[in-house]
Image (cartoon, rainbow, N blue to C red):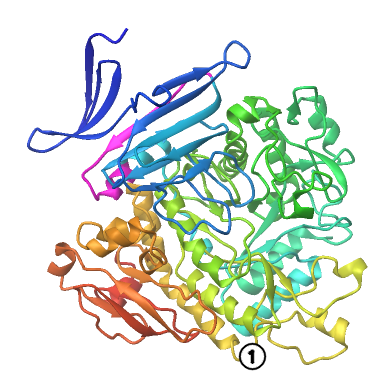
Amino acid sequence: PYGGSATIRNGRLVAELAGGVLSFYRLEANGSRTLLTQEYTDDKALPARYYTQEFRASSFAAQFAFSSDVEEMVFGVGQQACCRDNSVNKKGQVVDLLNFNSQVPIPVFMSSKGYLMFFNYPGQGRMEFGQYRTRFVAEEVTVVDYYIITAPVGDYDALQQQYTAVTGRQPTPPDFLLGYQQSKLRYFNQSQVLDVAQRFHDEGINLALLVVDPYLGTDFFAWKYQGDWSFDSSLWPDPAGMAADVKRLTGAEMMVSLWPSVEDLSVNYQKLQENGWLASTRDGTGVVDSFGGVYTRLIDSTHPGARVFLWKRLNDSYFSKGIHNFWIDTDDGGSNGEPTVNGGSSTTGISYARAFAEYFIGTQTAAGKMFPWLHQQAIDEGHHNLTDTPAGATECKYMSLTRSTFAGGQRFCSYMWSGDTMSRFDVLLQQITAGVSVTASGISSWTLDIGGFTGLNVESTYGRQLFVRWIAMGTFLPFMRVHGDRQCSLSGPSDIFSANSCPNEVWVSSAFYHLVTQKDTQPWAYGEENFPIIKNYISERYKLVPYVKKLFQQLQATGRSIMRPLYYDFSLSDPIVVSGTRANDGLVTNQFMLGPRILVSPVGIENATSKDVYLPILNQEQKNQGWTWQHWWTGKDYGSEGDTFRVDAPLDQIPVFYLGNKEDILSGNI
């Protein structure tokens, strides 16, 4: 069975089968071949291709192993769960292919040896990046399908260009989404939303998007029952009027959150059940999860009929009333994916996907990652149908925000955020490595909760400082989005204010503050001294919009990443970038490039007034243009030869450096 040989060439990639071993080579310009990887054939290891069959006749488990070496670096593999993984180089890690809150593994990686490998498997399993072996484990498959491409060493943009040409490219977002996005957990009624919009207007602060996140606790919903996908009219009497007033006051669009959970009392339950549009289990419909004190099931968004039904409800309840953007929360699949609820106890929330959940397209084990992907598609299809834009359009009129996705999710008018994170300085830095890892997995439309999701006390010195540091970083991300569950000493009547009485704007809601305290003077939520700083960062974001817009246009045309780890641009010119990336040294990995011309070095230490920043050695093309590193706020020149500099880092000046002419950048020249 191991006799003979065969060779296939596609461009610069050569696949060769010899002696039963499959090897992949890059064809160099001089005609020589460079080995990228080959099936792992150590005598004291499982075979490179190893199968077991424990399922129905058409399914089996599979393991595939390929050679590696100790010097190889591995990048991507999606997003690891908050909040301990601070790595950019994933060498030495085992990545579980299981989606839950903040864990979005995508089985694609780039190698420092100049290749990208994508395992086209949307089920559960793992990827192992050992010293001498890279192994992919699939728990249930019907076919093993993987894809490999190559490019010159260090040309990660070429790998992304080829990968996104196959899996899809991000359409450019609408201009309004590139501005400031305001959200909190949670606005409790229509009056509060309009109060927030009025204050943005009065303070002259730009606002791009105002988000209604509708659920909290056991007795508060913006909808009446989970799965209604409509406002509770007692609290939200006029959605169309609300959207129009927000637009009139601020120019902003609105977004509303939707969950995939459906309880039996929902107005939609019977229709979903009768048509087989709810996710099932092997012994029948069963209970998929519980949340907020009630048992819930999941809409089966892998079923085309369920997707059409969901969009019809969203159109009737929201889109037709002027709320055009949708936040696809808790769409991890198999459960609500909420490990923060009651310590993950199954009595109030299943933390992780149930392997025995079954969808129209297959089991959670075999196809679970297609649940969030197809949930995104439901919104995308609806947007295209109602805005008369073709499915392959290169521009978006509106977008969805998702907590989870799978390979190719970037083809939709959708962007991803990093899930529920802790409000700590170390987590702020961890989010950088999370973001650039998602980027290396083909998804540039990424953002986070500015301030972190949970644990920030708006009255504490720590919390206020953390928020300012975080909004400073958010100014220079692909999307600038504030969200979180804040803590404070204020509390209101539980029948009205169970939606979290603490503010997440830069002020305290005037109507709320007067009701609770009977005082007319309202404080600034993050401190009076920080208000002008926060306002200036928001203004700075709007100066950057032409540049960010051009980056998204380039992303759509070429797949070139926006939030870029330093190794993308400087691995060929700077050995310190290479060694720092290999070692996951924060001096290198806790910085990123926004496009090709802006370096961002966020501050992740409490009470810091300065920071060590590493400015890489520029490549020859950059030097030929006369570029040097210049300080964003002062214009000070730091040269082009690379070094570590101790720079001032007051709250109002995040360490940021640019290449070339700043006005040229702000005009949108990349």
Q: Is residue 389 visible?
A: no
Query: Does the segment drawn in magenta span residue 157?
Result: yes
Q: Give the left or right position of residue 506, taking residue 510 as reference.
A: left
Where residue 85 appears, x then y in whole percent?
51, 56
Residue neighbourhood size for the residue with mark 1, other residues' Cα within 10 Å, grouped as few (<14), some (14–19), many (≥20):
few
Kind of residue at badge 1: Glu
110 or 209: nearer the viewer:
110
448 or 76: nearer the viewer:
76
Q: Which residue is mark 1?
A: 528
| First to last magenta residue range | 142-161
* Depicted 427 relative to depicted 359: above or below: below
Q: Give the left or right position of residue 401, taking residue 445 as reference.
A: right
Name the quadrant of the N terminus.
top left
Q: Residue at position x 24%, y 41% from top?
A: 151
Q: Which secondary structure lies at badge 1?
A: loop
Where residue 292 appears, x then y in whole percent?
84, 51
Where residue 155 appears, x then y in whole percent?
25, 49
122 or 254: nearer the viewer:
122
Q: Residue at position x 14%, y 63% from top?
A: 620
Q: Is residue 535 visible?
A: yes
Q: Residue at position x 65%, y 44% from top?
A: 331
Query: Does the segment drawn in magenta span residue 155?
Result: yes
